[in-house]
Image (cartoon, grey):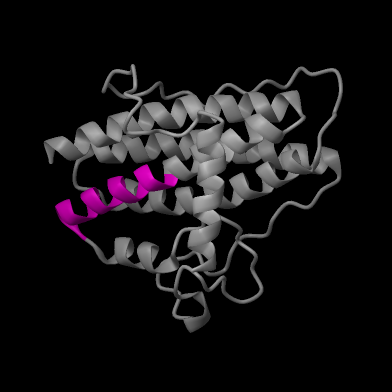
Amino acid sequence: MGTRRTRAALTAAALGAGTVLTACAPLALTAGPPAGAPAVVVTDVPNGEHNAQDVLFAQRMIQHHRQTLIMAELARKRARNPEVRATAERIERTQTAEIAQLTAWLKEWGDQVPAPDPCMSPGNGDKNCRGADDVGPGADRGPYVMDPADLEALSRASDADFDRMFLNLMIRHHSDEIALAGIEQRDGLSPRAKALAASITKARTAEIVHMRSMLVRF
């Protein structure tokens, strides 16, 4: 329950910044696939100014992206629909590049790069990893964490059921990334981190539109 309250509070904060998708604000985007290149990252900044929010953004986005990569790898190998597989491959390339950039910033700032979450792997039988409110053995996942049970269900799905479940989970996951990026744009200090947050918002919004268009056709 605590995780859901935190998710609701931070989503509300991001909505205040005007960066989260809403039903009352239709997107002026086409349903075609987004560009395959990684999100543009601004790196030529003359100083390394940053604040605690920049660090938190980098750490949480790395954790979030790692969850995304697990889902994308499953879809690349298991999805029946070739368009779903292509989407997973594009997401995998983009978010791998973003993890590398965020990791480099944390090292530059002298801050900790989060360790991989041992609970976030299909088939993990540890009961401490079950449930959205149970962060598992010593891991502080923060808001917007994926429920390990969702990942487990995805790993067991097959054929069209897998494709639909992947798209629905990834849409929700992308929406959470947009919320986290909105908080960074509002409260962060680093020009580079804020530029990446803006790029994430734009790229994930386009991908959500595309994935929704695929679901309609299924």
At horizontal 31% and vertical 35% (from top left) the residue drawn is: 86
Q: Position of residue 203 (x, y in %)?
A: 46, 27
Determine if the magenta segment contains residue 168: yes
Q: Which residues are magenta?
A: 158-173
At horizontal 35% and vertical 54% (from top left) the residue drawn is: 74
Residue sitting nearer the eye, 25 or 87: 25
At horizontal 19% and vertical 40% (from top left) the residue drawn is: 215
At horizontal 37% and vertical 31% (from top left) the residue drawn is: 207
Q: Position of residue 18 (x, y in %)?
A: 51, 28
Q: Is residue 86 above or below residue 114?
A: above
Q: Is residue 39 above or below residue 212?
A: above
Asked if residue 96 can be seen in this view, the reply is no
Quadrant in which residue 156 is drawn: bottom left
Residue sitting nearer the eye, 179 or 103: 179
Pick the quarter of the image with the C terminus. Answer: top left
Residue at the limit of the structure toward the left, as seen here: 218
Q: Report the label total.
A: 0
Q: Position of residue 210 (x, y in %)?
A: 29, 30
Determine if the magenta segment contains residue 184: no
Q: Position of residue 54 (x, y in %)?
A: 73, 38
Residue 194 falls left or right of residue 123 = right
Q: Does the magenta stretch mainly form a helix, a strand or a loop?
A: helix
Residue 137 falls left or right of residue 39 = right
Q: Is residue 103 above or below residue 119?
A: above
Asked if residue 183 can be seen in this view, the reply is yes
Quadrant in which residue 153 is drawn: bottom left
Quadrant in which residue 34 is drawn: top left
